[in-house]
């Protein structure tokens, strides 16, 4: 598999190791022999088009889907058969797609639920309030009164107060205005500074390339590209993303830049930013 | 004056119906389980109370200190085994399973306790005792006590759900089971706790009805479950205080019906129930219906 782990800076033992993972949705083979290794301190980005299997991969790591074959190892232990709530207690915490806040609970209660089974660690509700200044004054409000970006921030806060070792972020940018997405990704350094490892799924390729230390591209449930952002060309990313075949993947970046489909030379801004953005 | 009396009696009976209904409402609100064995379990609690009183000679009014925990444990166990097993298949399966449970309990009671009716004698003159308002309105102490118990139960439930750790988890799981799992909460355990709380209220309902009237093996389905169901629907599905409102509306409708003709008592209650179902299916308190 193309996971070029040998020359990765994190080294040591991987925190999260997915081996030959196969997941089915009914008859559909959603993931086909996916392997990846995430080392401590990395920002590992999984990119790919709609239906590539990104969310399925993340949900399987969180324990919400059961693999047909293959394994998920966390900190050296096989957690493939462990329930999602137990994985959360061990430190695999996911921010689910579409935020999934508790609608009948207040902002503060959402954080309290997140903190109920927290591991010991640096993150507290107080610290989340410090990071997102608006949250403290609005802690009594229902989540429906928050904007999309605020809801996303709360969803991340709810995951952080559990003190995860690896934070899984599923489509954080979905449905948000670019400015808001920038602001949320702007928080990433603060989060990483507390020693977390981040595994994220992102449809917006340019965003993923900006923040990631390692990228992994999926297409129809298979790995088409993996490596450090600096080591892959825009052309390679584009070919892997759209599945232009091995010939196209091998072609160099200069040629790909001429392709009419490509949005921009350097950043490969290929993906549409999700349905309907909101402020 | 007879009408005023009917309305007052109806309101007070509403407290009893709220006790019947709040556990049913809680289980539906949290795990979408319509527990068709709800009434039979209340009868079981009543029989357990009779047994406890006979064997241990605890004062009748304090029997709930034993019966409520016993029923709560039974609730947790039933939820984690039979009901959860049904839920894992489909919500429809829970209807069939709890219906089966209801039949089994009813026949078990018939087998072991015969069809004779039994009452929980308070021995305090509380059942017969009453005070007079004005010149014609007689109010029984027992109904006032039951009404007060219902209000206290609802207050405690509300406090538990809003201010306690498990109450918060129950609401979170009811909102989004999967998101709660991602936060580390085992929803099966949380469901079990919700069932334990619901069964605790069922125990109080059974004891209260045993004191107010008489228990028979069939009382569970032909009275308690149906009145609980009517109160929940009138008040609004999943709404806690709605059960008290629904119970009061049902009680008043029955008393007014009885005032017109004693044989209309039960019918009048169900007519209001039907009218609410047709005209305002979300119930009188519609807070839950909006979300």
Image (cartoon, grey):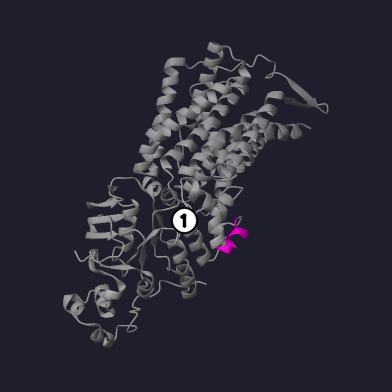
- In the image, the segment drawn in magenta is A132-139
The chief SS type of the magenta part is helix
Classed neighbour count for the residue bearing mark 1: other residues with Cα under 10 Å, few (<14), some (14–19), many (≥20): many
- Residue A190 showing in the rendered view: yes
User: Which quadrant of the rendered structure holds the N terminus of chain B?
Assistant: top right
Q: Position of residue B66 (x, y in %)?
A: 54, 21
Nearest the eye: B109 or A134:
A134
Q: Quadrant of residue A98?
A: bottom left
- Is A137 part of what is drawn in magenta? yes
Nearest the eye: B81 or A85:
A85
Q: Quadrant of residue B189?
A: top left
Residue found 46% across the figure and 72% down from its top: A182
- Residue B290 showing in the rendered view: no
Q: Position of residue B198 (x, y in %)?
A: 52, 34
Residue found 27% across the figure and 73% down from its top: A241
Q: Residue at label 1?
A: A160
């Amino acid at each position: 598999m193309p996971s070029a782990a040998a020359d990765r800076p994190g080294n040591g033992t991987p925190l999260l190791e997915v081996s030959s993972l196969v997941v089915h949705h009914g008859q559909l083979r959603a993931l086909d022999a996916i392997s990846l290794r995430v080392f401590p301190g990395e920002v590992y980005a999984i990119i790919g088009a709609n239906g590539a299997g990104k969310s399925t991969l993340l949900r399987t790591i969180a324990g919400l889907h059961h693999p047909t074959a293959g394994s998920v190892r966390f900190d050296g232990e096989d957690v493939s058969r462990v329930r999602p709530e137990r994985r959360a207690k061990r430190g695999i915490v996911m921010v689910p797609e579409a935020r999934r806040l508790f609608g009948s609970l207040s902002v503060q209660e959402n954080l309290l639920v997140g903190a109920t089974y927290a591991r010991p660690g640096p993150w507290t509700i107080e610290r989340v309030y410090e990071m997102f200044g608006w949250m403290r004054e609005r802690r009594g409000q229902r989540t429906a009164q928050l904007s999309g970006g605020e809801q996303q921030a709360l969803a991340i806060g709810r995951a952080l107060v559990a003190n995860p070792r690896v934070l899984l972020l599923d489509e954080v940018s979905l449905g948000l205005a670019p400015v808001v997405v920038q602001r949320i990704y702007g928080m990433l350094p603060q989060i990483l500074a507390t020693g977390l490892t981040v595994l994220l799924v992102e449809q917006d390729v340019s965003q993923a390339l900006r923040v990631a230390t390692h990228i992994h591209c999926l297409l129809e449930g298979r790995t088409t590209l993996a490596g450090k952002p600096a080591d892959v060309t825009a052309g390679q990313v584009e070919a892997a993303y759209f599945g232009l075949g091995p010939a196209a993947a091998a072609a160099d970046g200069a040629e790909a830049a001429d392709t009419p489909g490509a949005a921009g030379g350097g950043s490969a801004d290929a993906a549409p930013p999700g349905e309907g953005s909101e402020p | 004056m007879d009408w005023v009396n009917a309305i007052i009696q109806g309101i007070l009976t509403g407290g009893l119906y709220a006790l019947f209904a709040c556990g049913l409402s809680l289980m539906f609100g949290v795990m979408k389980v319509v527990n068709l064995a709800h009434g039979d379990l209340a009868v079981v609690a009543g029989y357990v109370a009779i047994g406890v009183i006979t064997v241990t000679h605890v004062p009748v009014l304090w029997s709930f200190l034993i019966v409520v925990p016993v029923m709560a444990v039974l609730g947790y166990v039933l939820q984690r085994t039979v009901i959860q097993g049904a839920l894992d298949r489909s919500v429809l399966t829970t209807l069939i399973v709890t219906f089966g449970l209801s039949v089994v309990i009813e026949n078990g009671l018939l087998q072991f306790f015969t069809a004779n009716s039994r009452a929980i004698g308070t021995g305090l003159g509380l059942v017969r005792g009453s005070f007079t308002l004005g010149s014609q309105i007689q109010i029984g102490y027992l109904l006032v006590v039951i009404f007060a118990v219902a209000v206290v139960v609802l207050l405690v439930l509300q406090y538990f759900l809003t201010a306690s750790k498990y109450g918060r988890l129950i609401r979170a799981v009811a909102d989004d089971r999967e998101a709660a799992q991602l936060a580390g909460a085992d929803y099966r355990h949380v469901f079990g706790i919700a069932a334990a709380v619901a069964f605790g209220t069922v125990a109080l309902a059974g004891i209260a009805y045993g004191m107010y009237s008489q228990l028979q093996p069939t009382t569970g389905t032909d009275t308690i479950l149906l009145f609980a169901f009517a109160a929940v629907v009138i008040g609004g599905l999943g709404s806690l205080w709605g059960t008290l409102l629904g119970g009061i509306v049902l009680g008043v409708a029955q008393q007014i019906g009885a005032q017109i003709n004693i044989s209309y008592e039960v019918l009048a209650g169900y007519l209001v129930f039907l009218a609410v179902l047709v005209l305002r299916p979300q119930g009188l308190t519609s807070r839950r219906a909006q979300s």
